[in-house]
Image (tube, helix red, strand yellow):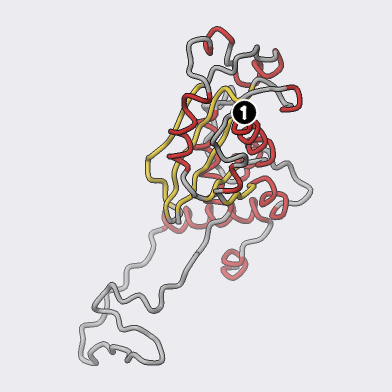
Amino acid sequence: MRQIVLDTETTGLETSQDHRIIEIGCVELVNRKLTGRHYHQYINPQREVDEGAMQVHGISDEFLADKPLFADVVDDFLAFVGDSELVIHNAPFDVGFIDHELAKLPDQPKSIGNRCGIIDTLVLARQKHPGQKNNLDALCKRYAVDNSQRELHGALLDAEILADVYLLMTGGQVKLNINDQTNPDVGAISGDASVRRLSADRQPLKVIRASQSELASHRKKLEAIKSASGQCVWQDLSQ
């Protein structure tokens, strides 16, 4: 499963006022693991950046003056994204701006949603933490994700941070591979396969108990889980 965690920065808030994308940042996940591959591009919007927007991301008109146009980078961007699933915080905003850019170009898809699935992490966060702040900074604090370098918004940095938040927010066991026979020493459990039994005269397994420092770290982790989600079954069972 290939997913692209994506973020954009723009000249302003409204496509209806022809505000444009000035930065795109993407990081790649394959089977819920960061691959290290990323896409990052600054873009000349051919218009001025609103003062309010510049205060958020710090990207000036002078900096963007020599950057390529969206039309010049769209093929590389779409090639990187492919038909993957996009993971975006407040997806309607970023998708709306991408579609606004695509609509200006001939021979391009008119909506990124026609080729990619889309997951809105803001919707996920509101479902998981109703009535709480669910912006990216709040989620970083809730899931103990380091965002100390986020003095200003930046598309690539925000995509990297969002990837960590998304994996933690949707974490846990994804698939129980009972029938995985990649390990020849493990018998498959199914209706048409036998279970391989261990020898009755085998050597007893060595029991390695957790140290006091490991137990303390474990308790600290359980407390963090309970603080983030409001409950922790493992902590309740251990009391």
Q: Residue furthest top?
A: 62
Residue 153: quarter of image = top right
Find the residue positioned furthest to the front.
107
**Place of residue 62 in the rendered image (x, y in percent of width and height, measured from the top left):** 55, 7
Tally of numbered tags: 1
Q: Is residue 101 above or below residue 53?
A: below
Residue 205 position within the rendered picture, expressed as x and y whole percent measured from the top left: 27, 78
13 vs 187: above or below:
above
Residue displayed at 69% across by 15% down: 50
Question: Image quadrant for the C terminus?
Answer: bottom right
- Tell me which residue sits at (58%, 11%) in the image: 60
Residue type at the position of mark 1: Lys
Q: Nearer the viewer, residue 156 or 164?
A: 156
Q: Nearer the viewer, residue 228 or 204?
A: 228
In this rendering, the answer to whether 58 lies above or below 228 is: above
The residue that disc 1 covers is 104
The answer to which quarter of the image holds residue 181 is bottom left
Residue 84 spot, x, y in % from top left: 49, 49
Identify the element where label 1 is drawn: loop
Nearer-the-camera pick, 124 or 117? 117
* 7 left or right of 17 in image: left
Q: Position of residue 90 (x, y in %)?
A: 67, 40
**Residue shown at 50%/65% (left/top)?**
174
Residue lying at 46% horizontally and 29% vertically, measured from the top left: 40
Q: Residues within 10 Å of mark 1 (few under 14, many from 20)?
A: few
Q: Quadrant of the N terminus?
A: bottom left
